[in-house]
Amino acid sequence: MLSSVLRSKIAVQVNIEIMRTFLRFRELASTNTHLLRKVDELERRVTGHDGQLQQIFQATRDLVQPIAPAKRPIGIKRGP
């Protein structure tokens, strides 16, 4: 407030910087609000797919598991 009452060149510069700072703060606040809304929207979308993603992960794990060897050899037995 004092910088807007004083008439010196430095006071005017300080006042301008204060205004710029408040404008930047307001921009950041509005940008962060927009970003928070986007994150919330993304979370809602992804949350709906949790069950499907779990099925995909389980199917992938099942495919990667090693196959157990056969209990009996396959083929013709030779010899005594």
Image (cartoon, rainbow, N blue to C red):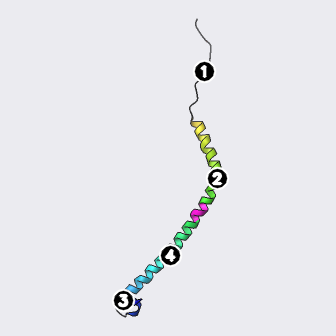
At 64% from the left and 52% from the top, the residue drawn is 49
Mark 4 vs mark 2: which is more N-terminal? Answer: 4
Most common secondary structure along the magenta stretch: helix
Mark 2 vs mark 3: which is more N-terminal? Answer: 3
Q: Amino acid at mark 3?
A: Ala
Badge 2 marks a residue whose secondary structure is loop
Q: Are marks 1 and 3 in contact (CB under 8 Å)?
A: no
Q: Are marks 4 and 2 in contact (CB under 8 Å)?
A: no
Mark 4 vs mark 1: which is more N-terminal? Answer: 4
At 59% from the left and 44% from the top, the residue drawn is 57
Badge 2 local density, few (<14 within 10 Å), some, or many (20+)?
A: few
Badge 1 local density, few (<14 within 10 Å), some, or many (20+)?
A: few
Magenta stretch: give its range.
38-42
> Residue 47 or 70: which is nearer the viewer?
47
Residue 11 vertical placement versus 54 (above, below): below
Mark 2 vs mark 1: which is more N-terminal? Answer: 2
Distance from disc 3 to disc 4, alpha carbons, whole Å, reads 24 Å
Q: Amino acid at mark 2?
A: His
Residue picked out by circle 4 = 27
Q: Amino acid at mark 4?
A: Glu
Residue picked out by circle 2 = 49
